[in-house]
Amino acid sequence: MNIDELKSVAGAIVAKQKGVLAADESNPTIKKRFESIKLESTEENRRRYRELLFTTDGIERYISGVILFDETLRQTSREGTPFAKLLSSRGIIPGIKVDKGAKALALYPSDKVTEGLDGLRERLAEYRQLGARFAKWRAVIQIDEHDVPAAYAMRANAHELARYAAICQEADIVPIVEPEVLMDGTHGIDRCEAVTSQMLESLFAELDAHHVVLEGILLKPNMVIAGMKCARQASVQQVAEASVRCLSRHVPAAVPGIVFLSGGQSAEDATDHLNAINIVGAKSPWQLSFSYGRALQAPVLAAWRGQEGNVAAAQKVFLKRCRLNGLAREGKYNRTMEAATEQPIS
Ligand code: 13P
């Protein structure tokens, strides 16, 4: 394990003003996203879409890394340049999703556990050769009104995340550790905070037991937020305060950065929340950044709709979302910027 390399890659991913584009949708997930714009999910359409994202001029000011799916890491631009090479040549670090998805946890009918550890060491060696310098593993924690998630399900997911993180560090690949407490449901923000706290506690105990070096990981958590169907939605300020409080109680200062997922928030909410989190958490020991999938891509897909003639307009939308999240990362965003056409920040 080369700890200096791990630290340097993790630090570069959470450099000032920058965050991560999660473009690692599995084929079933991207199929769902394409259905929303009535586009067939062929290998070529997936390639065209990822090419649109990765060739957008100017995103390198705000995007430090891109998480790819296995298929995408093996694809090329229309000129034949491998995507990983194209991204690296622009100063953007390629990453790879390595989990194989959340499956039902046996004998716990409402909980899930993420699979994908078998053969991971060998896969990582190949991914590194293909250019990946960081990885992602997503655990999924569902909340319901009663006894879900089970404490055991959280421990099982924490154990898998820690094994994954250790295997990544052994291969000199920075693990992004993602314990996602889902926003689905009617629960309030307090319950989200309690479950997120318990999950983080289990996670850091397991990371410690697995000898994972915290200076060489990034944490990708949910924000502490009310369930989407909760009648009492929390304000932006409440989300920021609860998120920073929860993280400062449970995330050691040695972790270099926290890169939030967007989890189904609208693009504007995800940016606004990140901005408020950076203001409330200005004195935090870790960088507070983003690793958004839907919140960066939903407006881009809507502008593109699969049409070649819409590529330039979709890229403009994409650059705008990257720029606004770059500002939010510094606590310099406000919602009036959504309407304005502004110059990139230097
Ligand atoms: P969302 O921002 O759409 O939640 O996706 C981030 C991600 O990578 C989930 O694993």
Image (spheres, rainbow, N blue to C red):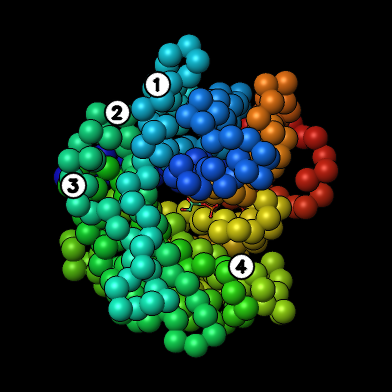
Identify the amino acid type marked 1.
Answer: Pro
**Among numbered discs 2 and 1, the one appearing first in the sequence:** 1
Identify whether 105 is placed above or below 38. Answer: below
Q: Nearer the viewer, residue 41 or 164?
A: 41
User: Which residue is under mark 3?
Assistant: 119
- Per the rendering, the mark at residue 240 is 4
- Per the rendering, the mark at residue 61 is none
User: Which residue is under mark 2?
Assistant: 130
Q: In the image, residue 129 lies at what x, y percent?
A: 24, 29
Locate residue 62 relative to residue 200 in the image: left or right. right
Residue at disc 2, CB closer than 8 Å to ligand 1: no
User: Which residue is under mark 1?
Assistant: 82
The mark closer to the camera, 1 or 4, is 1
Identify the amino acid type marked 2.
Answer: Leu
Q: Secondary structure at mark 4?
A: helix
**Among numbered discs 3 and 2, the one appearing first in the sequence:** 3
Q: Give residue 243's quadrant in the image.
A: bottom right
Q: Secondary structure at mark 2?
A: loop
Q: Do residues under tags 2 and 1 come within 8 Å of each other at their CB atoms?
A: yes
